[in-house]
Amino acid sequence: MTAENLPTLHALRRSPIGHLTDVLAEHSAAGRRSVRLREVPFLAQLDLQLHQHGSAAFDRIASALGEPLPTTPNTAVEAGDLRVLWLGPQEWLLIGPDGSAPATADLLRAALGDEPGSLVDVSANRTTLELAGPAARQVLEKGCALDLHPRSFGPGRCAQTLLSKVGVILHQVDAEPTYRLLVRGSFAQYLADWLLDAMVLL
Amino acid sequence: MSHQLPAHQLPEHPDWLWRTPDPKRSYDVIIVGAGGHGLATAYYLARNHGITNVAVLERGWLAGGNMARNTTIIRSNYLCEESAALYEHALKLWEVLPQELEYDFLFSQRGVLNLAHTLQDVREGTRRVNANRLGGVDAEWLDTDQVRAFCPIVNTSPDLRYPVLGATLQPRAGIAKHDHVAWALARRADEYGVDLIQGCEVTGFLRDGDRVTGVRTNRGPISAGRVALAAAGHSSVLADLAGLRLPVQSHPLQALVSELLEPVHPTVVMSNHVHVYVSQAHKGELVMGAGVDSYNGYGQRGSFHMIEHQMAAALELFPIFARAHVLRTWGGIVDVTPDASPIIGPTPIGNLYLNCGWGTGGFKATPASGWVYAHTIATGEPHPLAAPFGLERFTTGALIDEHGAAAVAH
Amino acid sequence: MLLIACPWCGEREELEFHYGGQAHVGYPANPEGLTDSEWAEYLFVRDNPKGLFAERWSHAAGCRRWFNLIRHTVTHQILAVQSNRPVAAGQPKPVIP
Amino acid sequence: MNRLSDGGRVDRSAPLRFTFDGVQYTGLRGDTLASALLANDVLHTAPSLYRGRPRGIATAGVEEPNALVQIEGPGAEPMRLATTVELYEGLSATSLRGRGRLDPALDEGVYDKMHVHTEVLIVGGGPAGLAAALAAARSGARVVLVDDQPELGGSLLAGREEIDGRPALDWVADVRAELTAQADTRILTRSTATGYYDHNYLLVAEDRTGRPGPVRQTLWHIRARRVVLATGSHERPMVFAGNDLPGVMSAAAVRAYLNRYAVLPGRRCVLLTTNDHAYAVALDLVSAGAQVAALVDTRPRPPAELVDSARRAGIEVIAGSAVVAARGGARVQAVRIAALDAADTISGPVREVACDLLAVSGGWSPAVQLWSQSQGSLRYDEALAAFVPDEAAQNVDSVGASRGVLDLAGCLDDGFAAGARAAALAGFPVAVPPTPPTSGDGRPARPRPVWVVPGESGEPSDWSEHFVDLQRDATVADVQRAIRAGMRSVEHIKRYTTIGTAHDQGKASGVSATGVIARLLGARSPGEVGTTTFRGPYVPLTFALLAGRERGALFDPVRTTAIHPWHVRHGAVFENVGQWKRPRYYPRPGESMEAAVLRECGAAREGVGVMDATTLGKIDVIGPDAGEFLNRVYTNAFAKLAVNSARYGVMCRADGMVFDDGVTLRLAQDHYVMTTTTGNAAGVLDWLEEWLQTEWPELRVRFTSVTEQWATVAVVGPRSREVLTALAPELDVSNDAFPFMTARQILLANGVSARICRISFSGELAFEINVASWYGLATWESVIRAGEHLGITPYGTETMHVLRAEKGYPIVGQDTDGTVTPHDLGMEWVVSRHKDFIGKRSFARADTARTDRRQLVGLLPVDPAVLLPEGAQLVADAEVAVPTKALGHVTSSYRSAALGRTFALALVAGGRERLGETVYAPLADGGMIAATITDTVLYDPKGTRRDG
Ligand SMILES: Cc1cc2nc3c(=O)[nH]c(=O)nc-3n(C[C@H](O)[C@H](O)[C@H](O)COP(=O)(O)OP(=O)(O)OC[C@H]3O[C@@H](n4cnc5c(N)ncnc54)[C@H](O)[C@@H]3O)c2cc1C
Ligand SMILES: NC(=O)c1ccc[n+]([C@@H]2O[C@H](COP(=O)([O-])OP(=O)(O)OC[C@H]3O[C@@H](n4cnc5c(N)ncnc54)[C@H](O)[C@@H]3O)[C@@H](O)[C@H]2O)c1
Ligand SMILES: Cc1cc2nc3c(=O)[nH]c(=O)nc-3n(C[C@H](O)[C@H](O)[C@H](O)COP(=O)(O)O)c2cc1C
Ligand SMILES: [Zn+2]
């Protein structure tokens, strides 16, 4: 892929809820209590899984990223413009800016070396919804059973969990609070509808 | 209660039901568990085989297990021929039992609809209707309009998430008042001389080598020529006491009732896909079952989200229920086999018989279960209708897989 | 709704998990060497105690790890949670809150 | 009007108009429907359900047995209690005879849910609960306090107690203010804890009628480290002749109507009590201007101070006696009073006293419902004559009246201690606040319960006006009948008489019922009889509240592919497959499904068709042991599959039955991508993880679900190659360069990176183009454009099914049903003999090895125009004598454009031995279709078409 054809290529892309941009914006403005919802489409996402035998690779990845992969469950770290989310004892999701997946993948592949591990570009697998504002937590609490109180869940925390009937990766990015919800493409419309409905009911 | 009953009210109970005897030292047959199946077995042992030196031992109160907890759906439109034959035998018995037992237990043949919501459901439904008709079981296929005509409160809008594409109907199917069924059987069994002994928990078996000679109970040992288990959710616990392991797992199954409502729901509706089954009992309460909880449990209670899902599903199909109220919820302990079919027959241990594994659907089988089990106990040979349901099917692989074949509950 | 402590993610609602029945039932080393009834035992027969039960769960909507726990089948009290496999050095340890 | 001129918690400046049974009335803000009715001198409710007896408002709370109403609007709802409906402007209600009426009009209410966690949850905002909340909140722990009333204070709202030398409600206001100031304390009023489940999980139903916002009710799901139950107690009725007459009311209710609602429910009153409580009520009645004709106390020697204070107020106290009958027509007019001896028998003359109100205190039943739901045990306390909490089963304490502490100071003490304890146990240690001084006489004296006040004549079996359960019209005579019939267990008697099964679930009358049973059975104490099981919900809950917002459009997610908008624009008819919406066919205007499908099939066989295959599950299987792993889960071998090659595989469960199938592609030495059936994607991933983690952890392989990463466009038909060439000019699509069951990675002409596989589910030359789902729609559109001149035809699942069936390819779940082995499908070729795999051992079992198992075969109806219904049963003989055992059934059946006729697939016993035989399908309408058994592959049996 060359730089010249990127704009043409991007014109071909369509995110699962790209058609809702205006609706989300309207609701964000109109909510009784300020909660904002928007889609952050096309983020680069890589699913990395290691094997327990692979601690050397773990170290090499740390130096490649400039940050070790988070090993505390349910936490995320920032490494440059990447966010690395703990998904499981040997699994991480690396999230980067649009278009960064190939470069990051190369970096990680090199760091993995010969060690077994799995690295899959899942950028198009999920899209990202961002829910922010003082009442954002309350919106989530309508359908998420995690303890989201600041004592238990704050900036830098993440979790794979259920929101309503949908599996999501939930990531709190700041204390306002702002949450990012990564949802599989086919469920994105439902989740957006559900969130919009919840926002109306504040 | 006992005066000026409007026509749709519960009928009078008899003035006499059963004795409260102390256990004798020995019986020809001991039945463990006074649920519907244990009581029906006692009744038919006496009625069909003249065996009356029988005790039914019950750890709690008579018919206080699943018999007290089920949603009372009776039908025989099972897919597998073996099952359909057994349940149809039951349905035929239901049709004569109120007269035979002289007890109006409100058997109401109001029909059971099994709704189809996907093309796969339609294929499955058609298959079952055709199989049933071939097997001599009444069955019809209704299209969406006919469903609406039969049960006007069902939401047949094409805009439904899973629209109703049709339904199977078994007109002879319906409901009966569970407690009264048990009492009717108990009364007759008692009349024949069967001892119904409550508060008597079997805690072990008396053994003579590889056969049993009686049971140990919290009220002392009692010897018996034959011991027949009919303990539903507790079958594994009892089998364990005898050194037997069963292909049975006990799970919570929940149900609920609404407050009393004016009649709105004329039939029984079951939807596997949307997970609803509901009828309106004679008093007027809506009776609904929820799903089986995934985990094993003996607590007679399940997880509440099952009820919440149940309600969402119910409103999807019956918008008119929106403002009805859940009055009471409860749970039972269902004994589930790998193929969702019961186990009936002798065991590897001499004189010990087994009847269990009815899972979520044994109420409807009550009379037939008692009939074939009594035969098996009396003759030592499986009744022809029960023969396919022996334990050995798990070894040969000749499962009667209602689960696999159709996944229709209750 | 049970509250189950995933050894990795901590306490989560039952809805996030899949039940896996009795724990510690291994796939027979040599299935072909078993009699039909031994094989049937493996396929279909599991303990079903009223009381403490060692069982498997998988955190299906979370980290997808399978683990074992001991639960009382009447009270639903959960007595112990074990991750399903040993953990090597350098890897995160399961959290048991 | 019965409204008192001052006092109470009602707002005299806020009149509210309402209608009851068609008549207009006015009440005040702060009223319940019941208090407003009483204020308007309306005591009567609908007659009783079974016996049509007149009934009146009997209580002031959730324990009400009579005052059932139908809210007609706004917010129609059946079966509410007038005693718990807060009055609002325009309320319209009608009385109900014990049975509700559902409104067919669509429910427009919005019902919401919340999920919260807390260190301490306190249920009940009376003095005990408030004290607990205060203590706990001071620790900094999160505290949630719920109370079902609109105002905090609990029974203090109905009384005239003092705390710290001030009216108790001033103390309540202070506590409320302090709690509100705490950041992590949440107070939920109008919120009833309705269920207490395992692992300290409680449900709280919040009524938001009249609150801001569109939400009518919210169901709170609360997970608490510690719970404090401060739910108070219910005053019990007493069982005597005529105890159901309108005007017989609980003493606590009388007190609440007087003090809280400023309503005088009667002018000339008699009180009947077993305990101290009635004395305060009697004094309140007198000070409200009522006449108290007598206070009847069952105790021969009631506490002297109480008797003196009553006498000072001019009240006659009749000790050691009871009301043996209430008389009246539509309302109580008089009561008959007699002395009772120690055995509770009438031991003196009967005296009649006129009255229009009988206030009854049969003693107190701690509200142990939630405690019991939490599986805590109960014990019968003889001194209190009540069932009280015994052993806790969860992290919970019970305090105040809900555990039998009946004095105010005791309740406060209890609450403070429990609140501090709960916080400390949740990790927030805190000091126990000191208990302020209170008014009152300390612990009440011992009550004397009289479970059955004897009738003036006859036997229990005659006492059919001694009501035990008013709503069920069940009497002492009914209980006696159950016992005579042989019943001993309280559970049987409940079911025989239906006592305790009505709307009120025996909140007030349950223990009375136990007392009656104990009495009639001759038991030593009610403790011997016990209670029936307490079950949730504590108060009835609307179905809609439990459903929450997951109704209508939010009932269940609709999953769609990236290409979905195109399908919608082009008139696709959709089919639900699991949660997915898949195009079933694309009718042209006026075209029937049959015609559309024949057309679509024709295009795929003769020209080129295109299908959205995105919904198939996709799983990346990566690691050095990926091949070995696949070898173990598939019946056939994958370890030696060449890179960039694909293979069809079948998975079985351990019992040998087919569970899933699909094509797996090897992308690299250590990288495969597996496809699963649409409905089974999640199930297969779980299955793989289970085996890897629990059985073969030594295998170095990992799975990643990539179902939504990829959009998949299947281009099918003899002219598909031309479309591919236009789409990917750099790709050599010749058969030699790109053979069947191989894959290529390439940039399409539009710059999109694609993985293209030559796979065919139709028997035709076909290509599957996989692109990142972002590009799915654009890629689909470019395929359409590239094929336009070839008449490229989009087709749906129906056509896909026909095409594959013509080739004899089974669909798992349609042609199989969980009882079918690969051999039954005629797929011996997919079952390896050389390696072990899940399920293999099962094939050797006696039944699985039978040769007369149902096997998949083809069927050709003798009349080629006749379509066999899917699901038709098959028999060997045209003469059917029911019951007959079927040979098998039709699993798939279609009209074929290619064959120019109908055909079907079927599972038939010993089918492969029966090729050429005729079988018959008897139909529900009486018809019969004859068909010939054939091989499953009816189209292009030599497979010449797959290379184009
Ligand atoms: C919520 C629910 C809904 C259901 N709905 C339906 C339906 O609609 N239609 C239908 O057909 N079926 C239904 N069923 C299933 C049906 O209730 C059962 O299959 C059937 O009742 C089981 O047979 P039983 O009546 O003999 O069992 P039970 O009534 O459970 O009898 C077993 C008895 O054994 C006793 N026992 C156990 N251990 C011992 C011991 N050691 N010593 C002495 N006694 C012992 C128990 O106390 C119990 O009374 C439902 C079940 C539940 C729980
Ligand atoms: N004199 C007597 O004989 C006598 C008898 C009983 C009580 N009392 C008095 O009553 C008071 C008892 O105080 P307390 O705090 O224990 O009880 P309380 O009755 O004052 O308060 C309990 C509160 O909890 C609420 N509640 C009950 N169940 C609920 C639920 N499931 N969900 C939400 N809210 C619920 C009630 O509506 C009430 O507001 C004391 O003042 C005591 O002296 C006196
Ligand atoms: C068909 C059916 C109808 C019922 N109707 C009512 C009812 O109207 N009111 C009620 O309180 N309980 C009703 N129940 C539930 C019983 O009260 C009780 O919950 C059930 O038998 C389980 O027993 P348990 O709750 O004592 O464990 C009904 C149960 C069944 C099976
Ligand atoms: Zn986890």
Image (cartoon, grey):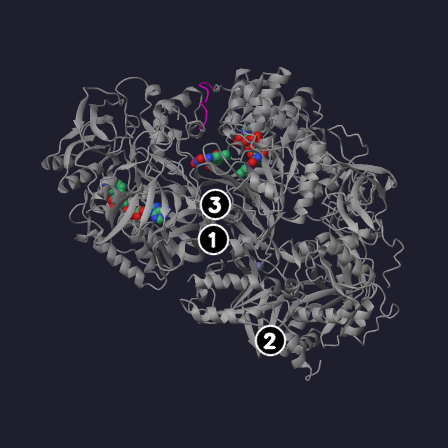
Distance between the alpha carbons at the discs numbered 1 and 2? 37 Å
Judged from the image, the secondary structure of the residue bearing numbered disc 3 is helix
Letter of the chain that mark 2 sits on in the rendering: A
Outermost residue toward the front in this view: D590
Q: Could you classify mark 3 by the number of other residues whose Cα lies within 10 Å: few (under 14), some (14-19), or many (20 or more)?
A: many
Q: Could you say where residue A113 lies in the image, as x and y percent from the top left?
A: 72, 74
Left or right of D544, for residue C37: right
Q: Amino acid at mark 1?
A: Gly
- For the residues tagged 1 and 2, is the chain the same? no
Asked if the stretch drawn in magenta spans residue D795, the answer is no
Point out the stretch of residues depicted in magenta. B9-16
Give the percent coordinates (x, y) of residue D474. 37, 28
Which residue type does callout 2 highlight?
Answer: Gly
Chain letter for the residue marked with disc 3 in the picture: B
**Residues at marks 1 and 2 touching, judged by CB atoms closer than 8 Å:** no
Q: Which label sits on residue A96?
A: 2
Would residue B13 be counted in the magenta stretch?
yes
Instruction: Say above or below: B101 vs A202.
Output: above
Q: Measured from the top left, where is residue D457 in percent x and y?
A: 27, 17
On the image, numbered disc 3 is attached to which residue?
B320
Residue D87 placement (x, y as % from top left): 29, 49
Which residue is the site of mark 1?
Answer: D548
**Badge 2 local density, few (<14 within 10 Å), some, or many (20+)?**
many
Question: Could you tell me how far apart the alpha carbons at marks 3 and 2 are, in whole angstroms?
Answer: 49 Å
* Mark 2 CB within 8 Å of ligand 4: no
Rendered view: D467 above or below B129: above
Secondary structure beneath dot 1 equals loop
> Does any portion of residue D625 appear in the rendered image?
no
